[in-house]
Image: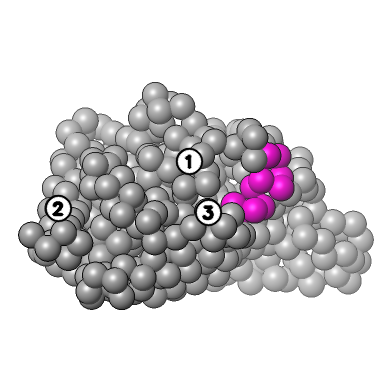
Amino acid sequence: MEKNVNILTGVRPTGSLTIANYLGAVKPLLELQNSGEEPLLFVADLHAITDYEPEQVKQYIRELVADYLALGVDPEKTTIYVQSVIKGQIMTLSAYLARLTTVAELLRVPTIKDKIKHGQSAESANALLFFYPVLMAADILIQRAKSIPVGEDQVAHLETTRVLAERFNKKYGEIFPIPKVTQVKSLRILSLKGDGKMSKSSPEGAIFLTDTLEEAEKKIKRAQTAGDKEMTPSLESLLLIVKMLDSTEEEQKRADDIIVRHKNGEQVMGEFKDLAIEIVKRFLTRFQTKRKEVLADPTYIDKVLEQGNDFARKNADETMVMVEKAMYGN
């Protein structure tokens, strides 16, 4: 291989990013990148078609890459590729790995059980949902990645990957590194309307990175906070946004001071929302300006993906040669 893949992470292209996506997924990636690591980031378009039409997913790929580049992902440090450019290798490896697990084991994966419980029945959920843990294992093992940063909801899938890697190695020889789980702190960013997590599926309660400054301001002004002296989950979530969205030290101190005054009974929620508006609008302005620069050169994203796709293909081809030599003995 040209270089070892120490850290691999993926993101599904399913529409415009929210500030929750930035804080929960992009910012940890930037911290890894800027600490001297060289992450491998894949755009998980095959995973996205579990819930979205392929034509729709295809449109989102370039938008997502533009977003990540505008947010600070440096293609000289972080290699970006599209999952489907190695779909043949991934699906072949998925078939080999599927031999090493059972239907019963996949049904016990907590995230699969949860999705079937919440809104999807075994009759309505498509089989891709069921196959998701095996496909995810193939994504990781095809690049022979050593470490995977994941949130709490993905730890069970990583355990499936580790088990499959161990079973393959035991049966055919030491081909795959056993990937280490690097758990990323899960941030609970709530909908501004107070009804669950901030989500793309509930746009009124989400601040999208593509929102106009006026749209973002309106959403924050209408956001749920708290009554007198209360610290509610909604207020804690907005405080998290204020303190983590690239705010200055002075702004963070202001936020803490406002919360102290609020707990003492002062009517300061309007002041707190004004501070949140100031921070969010500045962040959106910087992002949207940078995004225009990224999109100004139509060839830039093509070059970034061409370089990353070539790297991913070479690694995947090399892995499959090793896998099939171990399995078939030729």
Give the dominant element type of the magenta stretch: helix, strand or loop: helix
Determine which of the numbered discs, if any, sits on residue 128 in the image. 1
Give percent across and percent down for residue 205. 69, 40
Query: Do we see residue 91 in this rendering?
Result: yes
Extent of the magenta region: 111-121
Disc 2 and disc 3 in contact, CB within 8 angstroms: no
Q: CA distance from mark 1 to mark 3?
A: 13 Å
Q: Amino acid at mark 2?
A: Asp
Q: Is residue 302 inside the magenta stretch? A: no
- Which of pointers 1 and 2 lies earlier in the amino acid sequence? 1
- Which of pointers 1 and 3 lies earlier in the amino acid sequence? 3
Q: Amino acid at mark 3?
A: Val
Q: Is residue 219 above or below residue 58?
A: below
Q: Residue at x 39, y 66 (%)?
A: 164
Q: Secondary structure at mark 3?
A: helix
Q: Is residue 222 above or below residue 136?
A: above
For label 3, the residue is 103
Determine which of the numbered discs, if any, sits on residue 317 in the image. 2
Q: Nearer the viewer, residue 72 or 269?
A: 72
Q: Nearer the viewer, mark 2 or mark 3?
A: 3
Classify residue 153 by image quadrant. bottom right
Disc 1 and disc 2 in contact, CB within 8 angstroms: no
Q: Residue at x 39, y 24 (%)?
A: 55
Q: Residue at x 77, y 60 (%)?
A: 233
Q: Nearer the viewer, residue 297 or 49?
A: 49
Q: Amino acid at mark 1?
A: Leu
Q: Residue at x 88, y 71 (%)?
A: 264
